[in-house]
Image: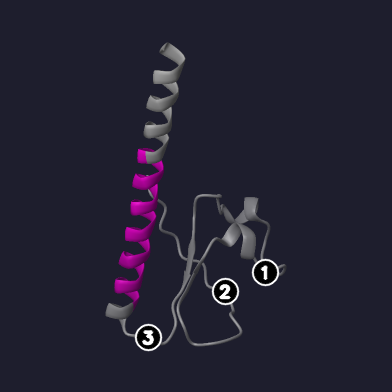
Amino acid sequence: MLDCSIMAIEVLGGTTTIISNPTFTLNRTLPKREVTGIAYGMFGIIVGLEYLEDIWNDIELGLDVVVNAIKLLIQCSLTFFYNWLECFLA
């Protein structure tokens, strides 16, 4: 089950939206990762003063980049494996 809980934290700084991996950017004043339930695969979104449509477009663009990178990685891995297998069986 997907946990979509929301944690309010104080952010000092700009007014832009930030997406980050909270396991590496947690403030020292927050409870430890184990207490908050933050896992390594999660990410946090700090919503700034922007139009919602712009935020959604940026998220979609970022996810497209990740998906394309994973596809390329799989393609390169399969090509390497097939070439290795061909040499091994020759």
Label 1 belongs to which residue? Answer: 27
Q: Is 39 positioned to the left or the right of 62 in the image?
A: right
Residue 52 spot, x, y in % from top left? 31, 80
Q: Choose top left, top right, bottom left or bottom right for residue 51.
A: bottom left
Front label number (3 vs 2): 3
Numbered tag placed on residue 77 in the rendering: none
Q: Which residue is drawn at 31% across and 72% down?
A: 56
Indicate the quadrant where residue 26 lies: bottom right
Residue for badge 3: 50
In the structure shown, which secondary structural element does the residue marked by tag 1 occupy? loop
In this picture, is 73 found above or below 48?
above
Query: Which residues are the magenta region?
Result: 55-75
Residue 11 shown left or right of residue 46 in the figure: right
* Mark before the other along the chain sequence, 1 or 2: 2
The amino acid sitting under disc 1 is Asn
The residue shown at (55%, 50%) is 39
- Please identify, in this view, whether the residue under mark 3 or under mark 1 is nearer the observer: 3
Type of amino acid at the residue the image marks with label 3: Glu
What residue would you read off at disc 2?
9
Q: Farthest residue in the front direction?
A: 90
For image coordinates 34% across by 45% down, the residue present is: 71
Location of residue 52 with respect to 5 vertically, above or below: below
Where on the picture, by quarter, is residue 86? Answer: top left
Q: How many marks?
A: 3
Identity of the residue drawn at 64% across and 55% down? 33
